Image (cartoon, rainbow, N blue to C red):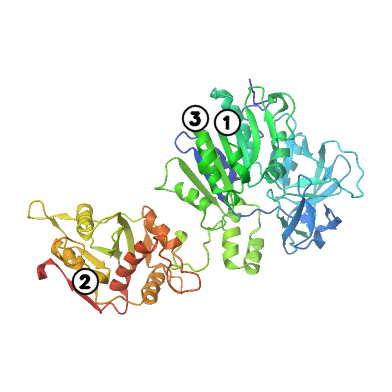
Amino acid sequence: MIRQGPIQAGSAWARPALSPAQWAIYEAGWNQTARFRVAVCGRRFGKALALDTMLPGPDGWTRMGDVEPGMRLFDELGQVCVVTYATHIMLGRPCNTILFGDGGEITADDEHLWPVSVAGTVGTKLLTTRLIRNGLAMGLKFHIPDLLPAGWSGSDDRRRAGFHLIRAIRPVDTTAVRCIQVDSLSRLYLCGRSLIATHNTFLMAEELRRAARLAVRENIGTENEIWYGAPTFLQAKRVMWGRVKRAIPRSWIDGAPSETNCSIRLRSGHVIRLVGLDASENLRGSGLWFFGGDEWADCRPSAWREVIRPMLSTSRGHALFIGTPKGFDHFRDAYIMGQPGGDPSYRSFLFTTADGGQVPPEELQAAEKELDARVFRQEYGASFETYAGRVVYAFSRAENVRRSAHDPNRPLHVGMDFNVNPMSATVWQEEGETTRQIDEIILPTSNTDEMADEIARRFGRDGFEPGRKMLDHITVYPDPAGAQRRSSAGGKTDIGILREKGFVVCALRAHPPVRDRLNVMNRHFRSADGTVLATVDPRCTRSIEAYERLVYKEGTNEPDKGLGFDHLVDASGYYLFGRRSVNSAATATSSFMER
């Protein structure tokens, strides 16, 4: 039987040492309805270290104050990583000198994060300098795991004890400090002559340990394994292998971990395994109880569809995907499924770098000035940035997606595209200068009669004539082609059908220039001065996807109609241009009373 270890209930040290954002993800786990969690996160930084802190790398030692982007350091597993960003020098931050049992010293600010084990508890915690200092005052003992990089040729010749005892932490006068970012998946690097690992996250390791504990409690068959997956096996080993060996108590493990396969067999018979998803077709076989996917945007989407998801079915297993956005891809699709109105088996989270609490505001401001706006939004704002050439470029979920219930006392405005497969319409209501999309209607392989009947069914008002809905509160702004197009067996034009049904029809006399129609749309979603005049209810998922994903054909000003995102954009464009364009006088309005 796996036991949790000597952690006592109610101890402040028993809770996994996660940031508030990580804790929100962790606490939502193992819900029987939402089995698949998706965590979209901005890039992480370490906290600040003093400028004279020595950092080891394959080329020797470098002072923190001398580090520049492009330099090579060692990550926490002894592998070479590259510095991708270095902050400016920061002053005025509360600082401390951390004294280690082997005589080493490192100066860091109050909020620097350290991977530590606490005497009398199981596993590794992620604690700030300030919290460790308070714990030392309470008589607790803290150790930091150490690592000797493979092939290390530095001058340090201390014998390795496997960990460093934190002997004392002494507040010091404020000193100049800075942060750096490295390209290792863990964002971790070694520092100090004692090769101490700094700034780490432990969410996935905590999830693997919890999955093992729950597998025993729920009597899950031992053929259902527990996996951590990364884009490649080498990445999985570099990021998680040392960490998972520290996270799983020795008393849980049967025999020795397999260094070749990066797997741990537990005394319960369950197996924790690290896998690479670049050759996922070779992973079929066992069932799965838990899967943790890291840097999910960089993983092959077929690995989930064809291998991992089917393997979770037998045990009704759970999964967690973590990563930073890389555009409109499978990771974004998974995030969307976890949003309100999506797939109830998914739940998604989004945390910016600022939400993580590990980067001072002044540093974010500096990065925003130095980086391209799109890169900053993606890397630090956890924003799914699409490719260049978006047609409805002014639309964004953050500013334009708002809940908007149907108000039965207000008129309705419907934009309609007459494509047969699908027939598409967007439904709007106005409030002063603003307009709100409250619904969307998509009918595959349909016609104008069926679309008109569906609008009447959803929004028609009961009238005096039995069986006939009153529709004179609904104005339709159709595709101008409907004046000539005939989709009914009786030879009536599409616009004629709408008039006969009882709608008010506001039809453009001719197609406006595509550029003009799109300019009106973009101006309503966000004008040059930042004014937002159009919003979309989150239930209109197909419309939101169309606004985000319709792009121009490469090298042209022509929207790419190959993926079908143009129909709902066209429908909304006919309404917004016909209703709100300066050229809206070029329309013909009529109702069934004019038949």
| Quadrant of residue 537 within the rendered picture | bottom left
Give the structural element (helix, strand or loop) at label 2.
helix
Which residue is most to the left? Answer: 465
Mark 1 nearby-residue class (10 Å; few <14, some 14–19, many ≥20): few
Instruction: Looking at the image, tell me whether mark 3 or mark 1 is earlier in sequence order.
Output: 1
Kind of residue at badge 3? Thr
Kind of residue at badge 1? Ser
- How many angstroms separate mark 3 from mark 2 (CA)? 56 Å
The residue under label 1 is 286
| Quadrant of residue 378 within the rendered picture | bottom right
- Labels 3 and 2 touching (C-beta < 8 A): no
Can residue 502 be seen in the rendering of this structure? yes
**Of residues 284 and 450, the one drawn nearer to the viewer in this rendering:** 284
Give the structural element (helix, strand or loop) at label 1.
loop
| Quadrant of residue 239 within the rendered picture | top right
Q: Give the tally of numbered discs.
A: 3
Q: In this view, does 314 lie to the left or right of 444?
A: right
Expressed as whole percent of the image width and height from the top left, the position of residue 259 reads 75, 34
Can residue 30 be seen in the rendering of this structure? no
Expressed as whole percent of the image width and height from the top left, the position of residue 236 reads 67, 43
Q: Is residue 121 left or right of residue 398?
A: right
Instruction: Looking at the image, tell me whether mark 2 or mark 1 is earlier in sequence order.
Output: 1
- Labels 2 and 1 touching (C-beta < 8 A): no
Q: Is residue 504 left or right of residue 111?
A: left
The residue under label 3 is 314
The residue under label 2 is 483
